[in-house]
Amino acid sequence: GFLAFFLFLKELGKRLTSPTLSRKGSDAGAAAALSLKGTCTGTSAETGWKLCQMALVSYVRRYLRLTPAYAVMLLIFTTLAPLMSSAPPSPTGIMVEVRQCSEKWWQNLLYINNILSNPYTMCYQASWFLAVVQQLFLLVPWVSALAFWRPKWGLALVMGLCLASYMYTFR
C-alpha cells in the first residue's frame, strides 16, 4: 500500500509540474506532488481530470496485463485438472472447484469472486488473492487523492476502512 501510494504521488508530481523536472532516479516528483497541495498549475478541474485519466489508464493496463493469463489458467484448471487428478472423482476436492469454475468463471474474470462466493464454493480458491489485490488497486488512487488534497479526510477514511474490515472479519 505504501509503495503504491508513493508511486502514485511520484507520477502525479510528474504530471502536475513542469516538464523540466528530472524524471529518472529522482524522488523530486513525489516531493513536488506533496508540496503542490493548493498551488497546482491549472484549475482544480484540470487536476481532477488528470487524476481520473491516470487512474483509468492504470486500471485498463492492469486488467489487460493480468486477465489473459488468468483466463488461460482458469481454462486449464477447469479442463485439465480433472484429467490430471490421481484420485477417483468424488463430491469433494478438486471436482467441486472444477464444477464451480464452470458456473462462476465470470466472477473471477471480473475480480469479484471474493465478494460473491464464500470460500467453500469459490472457483479456484487461490485466486482469492488476485481479486483482493485488484480491488485494492482500484481503491488506492482515490484514497491517495483524498489524502493528498484533504489529509484529515483521507486519514479518517483509511481508519474507517480499517475498522470496517476488522469488524467484518471478526463479526
Image (tube, rainbow, N blue to C red):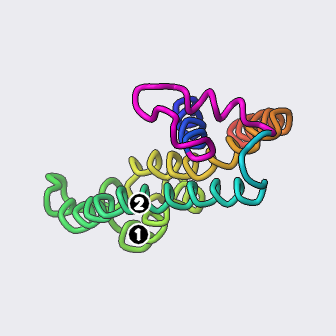
Between 77 and 145, the residue placed more toward the observer is 145
Instruction: Determine the CA span between mark 1 and mark 2.
Output: 7 Å
For disc 1, the neighbor class at 10 Å (few under 14, some 14 to 19, many from 20) is many
Does dot 1 land on a helix, a strand or a loop? helix
* Residue type (three-letter) at the residue carrying disc 1: Trp
For disc 2, the neighbor class at 10 Å (few under 14, some 14 to 19, many from 20) is many
**Residue 115 on the magenta segment:** no
Q: Is residue 155 left or right of residue 122?
A: right
Q: Which residues are magenta?
A: 15-38
Q: Residue at x 56, y 33 (%)?
A: 29
Horizontal and vertical percent position of residue 89: 23, 62
* Residue type (three-letter) at the residue carrying disc 2: Cys
Q: Residue at x 57, y 29 (%)?
A: 2
Q: Residue at x 63, y 47 (%)?
A: 141
Q: Is residue 76 left or right of residue 84?
A: right
What residue is pinned by disc 2? 123
Between 26 and 163, the residue placed more toward the observer is 26
Q: Is residue 12 left or right of residue 73?
A: right
Res. 89 visible in picture? yes
**Magenta residues, dominant SS class:** loop
What residue is pinned by disc 1? 105
**Residue 34 on the magenta segment:** yes
Q: Are marks 1 and 2 in contact (CB under 8 Å)?
A: yes
Reading the chain from its start, which is encountered first: label 1 or label 2? 1
Res. 171 visible in picture? no
Between 92 and 1, the residue placed more toward the observer is 1
